[in-house]
Structure formats: structure tokens, C-alpha cells
Amino acid sequence: MDDKALIYLDNAATSYPKPAGCMLRALARYIELGASPSRGGYDLAREAETAVSDVRHALRCFFGADEHYPVCFGSNATDALNTLIQGLTEPGDHLVSTCLEHNSVLRPLHHLRAQGRIEFDLAEFDASGFVNPDDIAAMIRPHTRMVVINHASNVLGTVQPVSAIGEICRNKGIPLILDVAQSAGAIPVEMKNWNVSGMAFTCHKSLLSPSGIGGLIIHPDLPIRPIRFGGTGIDSANLFHTQTFPYRLEAGTLNFLGILALNESLSYLQELETQGYRQMEMALTEKLRDGLSEIYGIDLYAAQSLENHLPLITCNVRGYVAADVGAILDGDFNIAVRTGLHCAPLVHKHISTAPNGAIRFSLGIFNTGASIDAAISAMSIIARNA
Ligand SMILES: Cc1ncc(COP(=O)(O)O)c(C=O)c1O
């Protein structure tokens, strides 16, 4: 590798770098306050518990949830999706989902089906990368327990019509479970307005926080069982896990440092919003899309329109395997991208890019016009040599 500065375009995997000031402030607060939240009657533990409650409140505001919606912390979106899917399903249930899902939904569904516990149907997406709400409606059966969908595809970047799907679910009395792993922080999320009953988030992507912190927000009437049992700091005489929210879905000591970091990142994102960071990211995405689309031999996926789209572009170079392009971008140009199937094998199957997948450029708040120019130029050199 040469001495070129790293151009990081893999923010859909995890955002990099993290805002240093936020992370340092969180660490300082943790050093000062690091008792176990909700695990002690002394002042320091109570202060830690208040700090956690403040972040639960900040998340409700950030995601458009009501104040009485429980916010339960876990380690990431995968953890939260497992809790939602396994904690809501009963033997014999039917679920509706889509071919746009990440393995964090597909694998729980396939494991539960292999155990003979559930059945499911997956709605397909159109050539532009969108699911049709009518297809979801048509799949709902009398014993459908939930609809679980990805808000925004981590492969194609397309943002799904959640509000219309939420309306269908509300009319049929079926909970809508939403995976906002990619959208949280990148685009607005309106949990209550969209009739979402349960939402899984992860904080290390566009929420700009460290890995190991995520969780779920639910409608308080959602009849969800815990799938992990253990200490909660409350109701300790009970040998069964507490039913009280948010502890019902939190077993074991929380990632307090991660929660404090999330608090800092949420404030930082709100400040960035006043400077129009989302518009800036999309302007750079458009620049990348336009630059790549002018290069002979590059195929773009679902990027004709960038309306309802995340700041990411996925493509292939004809004559190359995606992983080889990634290796050249890394080795010759010091550009970090994600190649392959992006943990979403059905998306690649449907756009005919399996088994090698594609090259994904995903932007973040620290990217500049110069980094996009460098990526376009590198791709043009690679395509010319194909
Ligand atoms: C759409 C989607 N859902 C879920 C996940 C899982 O997130 P985590 O690995 O943080 O649990 C990802 C991660 O890439 C994702 O893109």
C-alpha cells in the first residue's frame, strides 16, 4: 500500500471515523460516573440510571416514538431483531418479510422454519429496488403474526414505503417490525406516525457510536416475551424474569459506555442536521453516481433515481469479480469499500449478482468531494484495464 490517505467509503458496514470529541466526552463521563445503572441504591448508581433514562428519552424523540414506548438496550440490531422475532412468535405462526432483508432477519426466519415453528413468505422488490405494499398485503393470512421489513436496503440503498406498509398492518391488526440498522441517523424515522410496533436499531453505523450498543423500541402493548433471562437489578426475589419494561427485554449489565457515547452522538447529529448533513451526503452520492455512470463497463444497481435512497452506490465492473475490484481499490488507491454479498444474499440473487456480489460505496459525514473524485478516478482506471 502506498502513502495515500485512507478514503473510507464503507460507512454502511460501520461509520468511520467516529466523532472524536463525542467519544472522548463519553469516556470522560463514564470514568466519572461508571457505576452499574439500576443496580444500587447509592447516589452514583442512581445518577448512572438517570443518565441511561435520559438516553432512552433522547432515542424516543429521535425516532418519533411516544414517551411511553419502552426503549430496551442490547448489543446491536441483530440482537434486537432476534428478540423481536423470537419473542413474538408462537408455534404455527406465519410471518411476512421481504427479499431485501439482511441475514439478521433471514437467518432467524430460516432457523425457526427449520425447527417447524413458523412459516413465512417473502415479498420481492421491483427493478428499482422497492417493495410494493400491495404485495405485502396480499401475503397476510389469518394467522400472520407480524410483518418484518428492512427500512432501507444495505445493498441497494432504497428506502421502502414504510408508512404505506404500516397503514396496511394497522388495518389488519398485525404488528409491523422495522429494521432501521441502515436508516437510523441517515434519514428520518417516524416510528409512531408510520404505525411501527417494534423497531430494531444499531448504533455503530449512521448513529456514529461505537460497536456493541443497539436495541429496540416497542409499542407498549406489544405482547413480547423475553428470550434471554437473568439479572435486571429489579424484582430480584422473583425467580422468573421480570415483566416490567424496559427490563423485560434487558438481561445482564448494560453497555453503559456505549449508551453514554450514543447520547453524545445523538446531540452531535442534531447539531449536524442544522447544517444540512443529509443533503450534503446525498449531493456527494449523486456526484459519485454520475461519475460512475459515465465510465464504460460499470453497471450500477438501483441508482437511476436517488429519491428515497441512502447515501450509497452499488455497482460492478464488467470483466471483474467484485472482490478483486475491492482488493485493487484497497491496495492501489487506499480506498475502503465493501464487496461481496453484504449479508443479504437474496438481494444479490434477485439482481443476478450472486455468488460474487457487488462493490458498495457507502458515504458518511466525513467524506468530501475530493474523496469522491478519487473514487471515480480509481474506478475509471480499473474499468479501463478490464
Ligand atoms: C439492514 C441491516 N440490518 C441489520 C444489520 C445488522 O446490524 P448489526 O451487525 O449491527 O447487528 C445490518 C448490518 O449491516 C444491516 O445492514
Image (cartoon, rainbow, N blue to C red):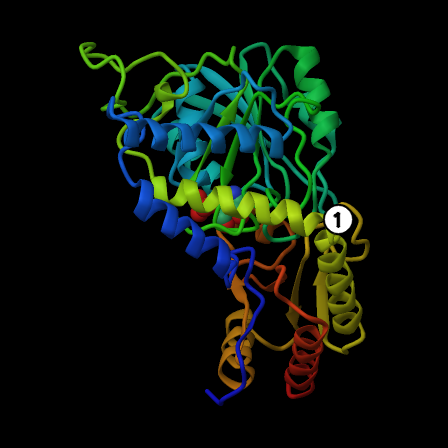
Q: Is residue 102 visible?
A: no
Q: Residue at x 44, y 52 (%)?
A: 25
Amino acid, disc 1: Ala
The location of residue 214, given as percent across then percent down, is 44, 39
57 or 25, which is in the foreground?
A: 25
294 in relation to 333, above or below: above
Question: For residue 373, which quarter of the picture?
Answer: bottom right
Q: Position of residue 203 (x, y in %)?
A: 49, 45
Image quadrant assignment for residue 252: top left
Q: Position of residue 63 (x, y in %)?
A: 61, 32
Left/right of residue 166 with respect to residue 228 in the rendered view: right
Mark 1, other Cα within 10 Å: few <14 / some 14–19 / many ≥20: few
- Name the quarter where the C terminus is drawn: bottom right
Against 158, residue 144 (above or below) is above
The residue to which callout 1 is attached is 127
Relative depth, front residue between 246 and 296: 246
279 on left or right of 17: right
Observer-nearest of 354 and 6 = 6
Q: Quick check: 49 above or below 34? A: above
* SS for callout 1: loop
Give the residue displayed 53% in from the left and 73% down from the top.
Answer: 326
